[in-house]
Image (tube, rainbow, N blue to C red):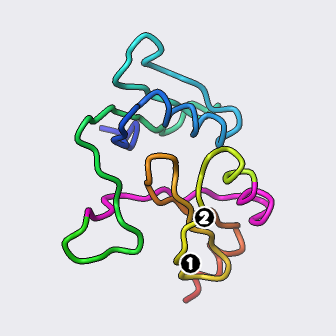
Amino acid sequence: MRLTAATLDAPNARELAAFYLRLLPGWRVWRGEDWQDWVHIRPPDGGTGLSFQTEPAYRPPVWPSAPDRQQMMIHLDIEVDDLERETARAVAEGARLATFQPQADVRVLLDPAGHPFCLYTEATEATDAAQ
């Protein structure tokens, strides 16, 4: 048994997959080119990928969490070399910077469907592990 992907629901699977393909250099469509409601993308090394499924009743999560609102079920952590440069690039590709930023050395962004994701550097990961 092995984990092959995390699947994100969205109003339009193809549009959200296209955003992540722009965000993640070298990733490519692995399955779903001919399907309208589901797409799977993978990194160049063929490791664990991301899938996107069209969900007509999709409601974006609230970040940060709030009672009686749609809760975040999962978020992606993406390691980058240059936090400020990659944050600006993610915004240019269609992400939004979240209003609430809980850490100075991590950037929380929202993808076009409203899913929160975090950009961080390796130094951040080492610092967090030490705490």
In the foreground, 86 or 69 = 69
In the foreground, 26 or 126 = 26
- 79 up-or-down from 8: above or below: below
- 117 up-or-down from 111: above or below: below
Quarter-of-image position of residue 5: top left
Residue of label 1: 101
In the displayed structure image, the side of residue 4 where residue 123 appears, left or right: right
Question: How many numbered discs sit on the rendered protein?
Answer: 2
Instruction: State the residue at coordinates (48%, 39%).
Output: 48
Name the quadrant of the N terminus.
Answer: top left
Instruction: Kindly report the distance in space between the C-alpha atoms of the residues bearing marks 1 and 2.
Output: 9 Å
x and y, in percent, of residue 58 in the image: 28, 44
Instruction: State the residue at coordinates (33%, 32%).
Output: 54
Q: Say what secondary structure mark 2 lies in.
A: strand
Instruction: State the residue at coordinates (23%, 41%).
Output: 57
Q: Say what secondary structure mark 1 lies in.
A: loop
Q: Amino acid at mark 1?
A: Gln
x and y, in percent, of residue 127 in the image: 64, 82
Other residues around mark 2 within 10 Å, as few (<14) / some (14–19) / many (≥20): some
x and y, in percent, of residue 4 in the image: 40, 36
Name the quadrant of the C terminus.
Answer: bottom right
**Tag 1 and tag 2, C-beta contact below 8 Å:** yes
Quarter-of-image position of residue 7: top left
Instruction: State the residue at coordinates (67%, 51%).
Output: 90
Residue of label 2: 97
Farthest residue toward the bottom?
A: 131
